[in-house]
Image (spheres, rainbow, N blue to C red):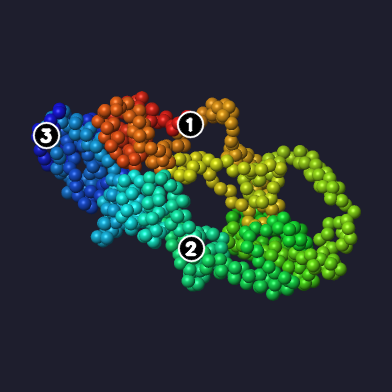
């Protein structure tokens, strides 16, 4: 049939009970959730677009509108939908043409058009729920689109023209400076710029609310001081736009904390801007350390402490239990005496979580002599000297330490289960900065800059292990960790060793053959992670190769005329949408080619 203008179609009122899905209808796979959503839409707004049918054995076969038919089947308790207006094909050839054409020509609304239409509907008074129902979309999807609706028109136009990606457009939502937004847009058009870079260009000095300084100061205090905030809607973060105010408040609050501690009897108290204080910093400052006079627990208290600690590690300790554990820990930790405080001081700092940390019991070089004479510094001197030169040379001390290590290693051979547990303990990161073995855990990057777009990994490679809290009793934390059993320990070893795997090409080939590596099990090319980051001519060639099209084939020439962004979206749909592949009537070989296809260098 070449001249479709001569088709004579009629509209007929057909009882729904006389309808069925025709074998000519190409849609055989549907998403049940989407059918339910469509039924809600039809119930609210009516059947906006008629279904099309053809008279065949057994009644009227639906050749166009299979999803609408399935949705209407859910609404048969409603008298409005028990009789349906059907566009009738005059013959089978016409019906077959309609079935193929309607599905092949369907194209999703461009995100830029959705953004504008969603925004216009909201201004007319439509709620998010109304928009979601009208579009058959989730409310979360509508919220994401509405978050972009107030972007400057040129930004949305650039998205529509394929000059920036959807995630690029989302990056512009952090800006409240329209002029700067347009300046940045001109710099990043068609450049394939990263979202992070765009955000830095829009707000180069902005600080996230998760920054340790912001956590310590608090957003309320920052705002009371006149500080301005913005937001990154898609990262669900608040941005601090006046870092100078934040730094001033941070410094003052940290100094106040130091002053409070000095008021508790310490000879001195100083604040440090760093997020961590290590032994090397204390060494560089030429400070000596003294230790609190620890307490001891009775046998009964020790048993109680162990039981409470295990419950705390399993997050199964009551509030009363936490109080009791804290009391017992305070006894164990001991306290500094007034005499010790008179010769020593503290350093205070804010860690990466924004929590105040204190390094206490530090003696300055100028105070060491007086501390030794008072018997304060001698108590923590391992050689038991009173300030005289130790008879143990540095070289001998190193040898003695090596002997101690060797003896410990020798004894560890008696308990392989303990060694495995320690190995997993360090690999998991649970030990924090404490190292158990002489190995270094290098991060092996396995997540692209586009994050998890079109990409997924076994959760064992991505789930984090919470680190022990700073200042925790590491022996207690390890005992609770080991108590989880050999099976847990082995699983920890396997998953962390797997996350460290990085090999050369020859060994990679052996491993891939043994474990049957298939990159496409984890990776599906899409506009964000691949197609939007290569040139238009390359996309055109891939389209032709995948669909076996000659250069002058109408489908190939139509594709070649599209903008780069539109090409990327069509290829994304071809790879990620089974309905699209079905609409193109792919052969089994073509479908397999798409399922196995990888960019150059990955195969």
Q: Are marks 2 and 3 in contact (CB under 8 Å)?
A: no
Residue 120, position in %: x, y? 26, 57
Q: Distance between the residues labelled 3 and 1?
A: 49 Å
**Which residue is nearer to you in this view: 149 or 57?**
149
Foreground tag (2 vs 3): 2
Residue 384 in the figure: left or right of residue 118: right
Q: Residue 240 carries which label?
A: 2
User: Circle 1 is placed at which residue position?
Assistant: 601
Residue 588 in the figure: left or right of residue 520: left
User: Residue at (77%, 41%) from the top-left corner?
Assistant: 409
Q: Do the residues labelled 1 and 2 touch (CB within 8 Å)?
A: no
Residue sitting at the far bottom: 263
**Which residue is nearer to you in this view: 221 or 556?**
556
Assign a secondary structure to mark 1.
Answer: loop
User: Residue at (15%, 28%) from the top-left corner?
Assistant: 2
User: Circle 3 is placed at which residue position?
Assistant: 5
Residue 569, position in %: x, y? 34, 40
Assign a secondary structure to mark 2.
Answer: strand
Q: Distance between the residues labelled 1 and 2?
A: 42 Å
User: Residue at (46%, 51%) from the top-left corner?
Assistant: 197
Tell which circle, 3 or 1, labels the residue nearer the N-terminal end. 3
Quadrant placement of the N terminus: top left
């Amino acid at each position: 049939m070449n001249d479709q203008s001569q088709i004579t179609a009629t509209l007929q009122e057909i009882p729904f009970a006389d309808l069925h899905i025709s074998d000519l209808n190409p849609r055989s796979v549907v998403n049940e959730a989407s059918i339910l959503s469509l039924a809600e839409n039809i119930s609210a707004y009516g059947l906006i677009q008629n279904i099309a049918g053809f008279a065949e054995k057994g009644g009227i076969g639906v050749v166009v509108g299979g999803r609408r038919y399935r949705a209407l089947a859910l609404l048969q308790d409603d008298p409005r939908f028990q009789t349906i207006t059907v566009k009738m094909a005059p013959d089978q050839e016409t019906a077959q043409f309609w079935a193929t054409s309607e599905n092949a020509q369907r194209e999703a609304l461009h995100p830029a058009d959705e953004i504008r239409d969603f925004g216009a509907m909201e201004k007319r008074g439509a709620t998010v729920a109304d928009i979601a129902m009208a579009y058959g979309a989730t409310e979360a999807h509508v919220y994401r689109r509405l978050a972009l609706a107030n972007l400057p028109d040129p930004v949305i136009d650039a998205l529509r023209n394929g000059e920036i990606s959807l995630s690029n457009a989302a990056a512009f939502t952090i800006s409240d400076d329209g002029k700067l937004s347009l300046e940045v847009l001109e710099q990043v058009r068609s450049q394939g710029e990263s979202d992070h870079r765009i955000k830095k260009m829009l707000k180069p000095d902005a600080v996230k609310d998760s920054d340790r300084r912001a956590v310590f100061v608090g957003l309320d205090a920052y705002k009371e001081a006149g500080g301005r905030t913005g937001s990154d809607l898609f990262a669900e973060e608040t941005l601090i736009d006046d870092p100078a105010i934040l730094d001033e408040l941070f410094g003052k609050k940290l100094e106040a904390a130091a002053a409070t501690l000095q008021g508790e009897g310490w000879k001195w108290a100083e604040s440090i801007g760093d997020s961590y204080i290590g032994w090397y910093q204390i060494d560089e400052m030429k400070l000596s350390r003294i230790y609190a006079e620890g307490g001891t627990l009775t046998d009964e208290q020790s048993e109680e402490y162990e039981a409470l600690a295990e419950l705390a590690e399993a997050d199964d300790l009551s509030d009363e239990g936490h109080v009791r554990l804290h009391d017992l820990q305070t006894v164990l930790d001991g306290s500094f005496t007034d005499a010790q405080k008179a010769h020593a001081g503290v350093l205070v700092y804010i860690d990466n979580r924004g929590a105040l940390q204190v390094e206490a019991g530090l003696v300055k070089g100028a105070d060491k002599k007086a501390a030794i004479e008072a018997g304060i510094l001698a108590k923590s001197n391992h050689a038991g000297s009173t300030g005289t030169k130790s008879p143990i040379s540095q070289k001998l001390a190193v040898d003695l330490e090596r002997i101690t290590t060797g003896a410990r290693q020798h004894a560890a051979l008696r308990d392989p289960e303990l060694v495995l547990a320690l190995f997993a303990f360090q690999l998991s990161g649970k030990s924090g900065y404490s190292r158990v073995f002489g190995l270094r855990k290098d991060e092996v990057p396995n997540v692209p800059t586009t994050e998890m777009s079109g990409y997924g990994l076994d959760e064992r490679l991505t789930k984090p292990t919470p680190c022990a809290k700073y200042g925790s009793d590491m022996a207690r934390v390890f005992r609770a960790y080991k108590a989880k059993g050999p099976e847990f320990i082995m699983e920890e070893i396997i998953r962390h060793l797997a996350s460290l795997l990085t090999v050369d090409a020859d060994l990679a080939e052996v491993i891939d053959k043994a474990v049957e590596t298939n990159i496409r099990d984890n990776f599906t090319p899409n506009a964000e992670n691949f197609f939007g980051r290569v040139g238009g001519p390359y996309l055109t060639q891939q389209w032709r190769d995948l669909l076996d099209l000659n250069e002058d084939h109408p489908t190939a020439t139509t594709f070649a005329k599209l903008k780069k962004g539109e090409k990327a979206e069509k290829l994304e749909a071809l790879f990620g949408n089974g309905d699209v592949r079905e609409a193109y009537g792919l052969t089994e070989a073509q479908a397999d080619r798409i399922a196995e296809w990888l960019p150059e260098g990955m195969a």
